[in-house]
Image (cartoon, rainbow, N blue to C red):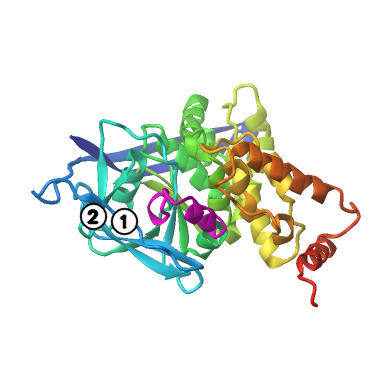
Amino acid sequence: MSRPLYYWKLLSYYLTIPLGLLGLSGWRVSFGVWCRLTQDRRIARIEVPFDNDGELEEYRYKRLDENAIRLLQLEPGAYGDPLRGRLIHADIVKGQRQYTALSYTWGRPDPTQRHLLRIGNACLEVWDNLNTALRTLRSEDRPVMLWVDALCINQNDTLERGTQVQLMTQIYSGAASVHSWLGEATAASVIGMEILSYLLGDGPFDDGAPWRWRFAHEVAQGLGDIIDREYFQRIWIVQEAAVGRRVTLQVGGLSITWEAADTRRFLARIKLLEISPLWTAPQSPAIDFRALRELLEQSSTAEAKKAGHAATPTLLDIVHTMRHMHSTDPRDKIFGLMGLAAPAEVAGFVPDYLLSWEETYKKFYDHTYAAALKDPSQTLEEHVKEVSSSLQVPTQ
């Protein structure tokens, strides 16, 4: 089996001539020439058996120390080579900026496709979407250090899962970058990423903007191909990408990257586009930026919180805003957002996967209801002090 790898370049030239001198005030004519160069290279998608001694045994996780995480050192190789790596224990503080945190959707396992990651003389099974992500991110000449939840957390250990969930904000905010993998590209992906790249920059919204010279259906298909993907509907994605100091959004071989400081500008340009007369006209493409806007809103809020010059939304506010998002485990609709709330808002509310989802939601209701009864005129700082005082153990 093989897959095409796309390389593309886009060359364009535009010219606009005002027609005011001809008595047509307010009118102008624009024309241009563009050329796209695409190269398809066939890459064999094969997985060579590791040995001739039968199947490898499943990898056995070693217990993590307190405040420790696992990192995956993905060994170099070509796309079609077997996946090989090492799982390394690292201190959550000392290991900061030494790895890339992968953000992706698990998807559903394909019973006809079995992908393996070899670790020493053992292996871990990898689902299809993660398999493609690892092969795309892998370097051909050097190891790559990653944090991947499906591999770096023992998913069969409920106690470990609960403990690691509490470290999620530190894991993603402490990474050198967060790599958001959306999946493989389609024919429409190029246009969608081209427009998002333009919105991420600082180019004027004139005739040179991609949406001004493309057909509306092309714009709709391109942006829809990116924004409507399942990735933007997953509850964990909000926390993962929102706290990243540097985020790379990738689909296939196409990517855009922004620093945390760029988030507000990116968000403002999306809002400006949405309220522009061009975008609201009847013939304009019907695009819903809401999922991307909400991710950037939370990122902007997290950045402002670190700077100490903005009020932080309560956990209830955040969960309510993200209530339309999906999660495989209904408990994650709460646990997946806790890292975005102020510590005082989540004090005493600890992720516990031993509780059923009914018990979890009852516990969350009691927690948020008690917080809602506090004095509405009380400032966040006063509330933090009050909660902190109530948690102190009385001295004898």
Does residue 358 appear to the left or right of 374 in the view shown? left
Q: Which of the image's four quarters has the N terminus? A: top left
Q: Quadrant of residue 140?
A: bottom left
Residue at image mark 1: 60
Instruction: Please determine whether, in this image, residue 288 is positioned above or below residue 131.
Output: above
- The dominant secondary structure in magenta is helix
Q: Looking at the image, which is closer to me, 229 or 210?
A: 229
Q: Position of residue 370 (x, y in %)?
A: 81, 49
> Start and end of the magenta stretch?
150-167
Report the mark closest to the observer, 1 or 2: 1
The residue labelled by disc 2 is 122
Q: Is 115 covered by the magenta stretch? A: no
Name of the residue lying farthest toward the left: 52
Depth order, front residue of 244/333 = 333
Identify which amino acid the numbered label 2 is placed on.
Ala
| Relative to 164, 361 lies left or right | right
| Residue at the (63%, 35%) spot, across then down | 21
